[in-house]
Image (tube, rainbow, N blue to C red):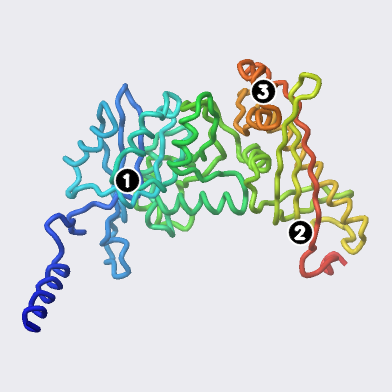
Amino acid sequence: MKKTILMISLIFLISILSGCWSKRELNDLALVAALGIDFIDDEYAISVQVIDPSQISSKQSSSRQAPVVTYHAKGKTVFEAIRKILALSPRKLYFAHVQLVVLGEDLAVDGIRDSIDFLARDQEIRNDFTIIVSQQTTAKNILNVLTPIEKIPAKKMLNSLTITQDAWGSTSEVDVEDLVTKLGVGNQYFVLSAIEIQGDKSLGIDQTNVERIETPVKLKFTGLAIFKEDKLIGYMDEYDSKSFNYLNDNIKSTIEIIACPSDGVLTTEITQSKTTTKGLIKNGSPTINVNIDIVQNVAEVKCDINLTDLTTIDWINRQTELSIKKNIDESLHVLQEKYNADVLGFGEAIHRADPKKWKKIKEDWHTIYPNVEVNVKVNVNTHGSGTMQNSKLKE
């Protein structure tokens, strides 16, 4: 009896270790790190950035072969174009490790709903990848640029996106789940981070782009792309994007520069930012009140100023408040008057505050929004001035 149990257990263990008939061997798969979608001549142009494991391993050879390979194909649908790539790739494409999807500018202008529907529906693609937009170029060109330090360009872009969001505040990470939710709401506005190529794009595809001290071709996040429903309607530069993130309570850390009373400037580091937005309808007119509480440190002093004086700290607080408010007012002008895009959800704030009155103005919100009064109050507290208060170098 014991021998029978032992034999059954052994057979079971062997069957586990030997795998199953439906398993996929790693050597038979092409791991896709990034996907690019363009719309050219009424067709979807798909680009996939595939990792070459032999070139990114710790025991890589001295070969000058690129660490990634890109394949491209066109089709009437995204799915058809992806299947056509199989005729080019030596292995079956494996999308479970996709980290990034780049939407081409022309596709974004035409509409991204169908593309996002496929990405969200496909069972092999995970739903936690990040989506960005290529500015003034195609997704194909973006994926063709080789990057230094980070051998896989998709990882470089993701790292840059996260760092820029956390330390500068001009980008915003959006995954496919967030985007599907926004696309499911009628007349909705949203933003995606925009990326561009700096330099000659034809050089970015060459291995020499990562073999020089100064890389001739770079990928840079430029700010935020504004969408109405599923169509791109414009861009905000990095400074307007930073102000947008202040208003959207999405600033983790950034810097502000203010002019000193005499010559020179002073730089502060924002370490905390908390925004609350409330709407109300007063005398029949909708109003938005925004309160931003900020904590900062003095980071760099390029002028003669006495940081040991409390009145100086009060002055720094006030000047930072004025600077941030001025930049925010300029960004609101861009959103309200230039694009007429309620991307900050002011309409929803009015709805929460007074559902009955909102129901009366809801249909006319598109014409009301550009003239809505937005009161922004910024409160700044400076908590530190570095390891030394007054610079001995100045003395």
Q: Nearer the viewer, mark 1 or mark 2?
A: 1
Q: Crowding near pointer 3: few (<14 within 10 Å), some, many (20+)?
A: many
Q: Quadrant of the C terminus?
A: bottom right
Q: CA distance from mark 2 to mark 3?
A: 41 Å
Three-letter residue code for mark 3 = Trp
Q: CA distance from mark 1 to mark 2?
A: 43 Å
Figure quadrant of residue 322:
top right
- Residue 291 position, x and y percent, is 76, 41
Q: Nearer the viewer, residue 66 or 232?
A: 232
Q: SS for tag 1?
A: loop
Residue indicated by mark 2: 297
**Quick one: label 1 or label 2, which is nearer the N terminus?**
1
Q: Crowding near pointer 1: few (<14 within 10 Å), some, many (20+)?
A: some
Residue indicated by mark 1: 125
Q: Nearer the viewer, residue 136 or 207?
A: 136
Q: Nearer the viewer, mark 1 or mark 3?
A: 3
Please say if the residues under marks 2 and 3 sit with CB atoms less than 8 Å apart.
no
- Residue 206 position, x and y percent, is 34, 48
Please say if the residues under marks 1 and 2 sit with CB atoms less than 8 Å apart.
no
**Quick one: label 2 or label 3, which is nearer the N terminus?**
2
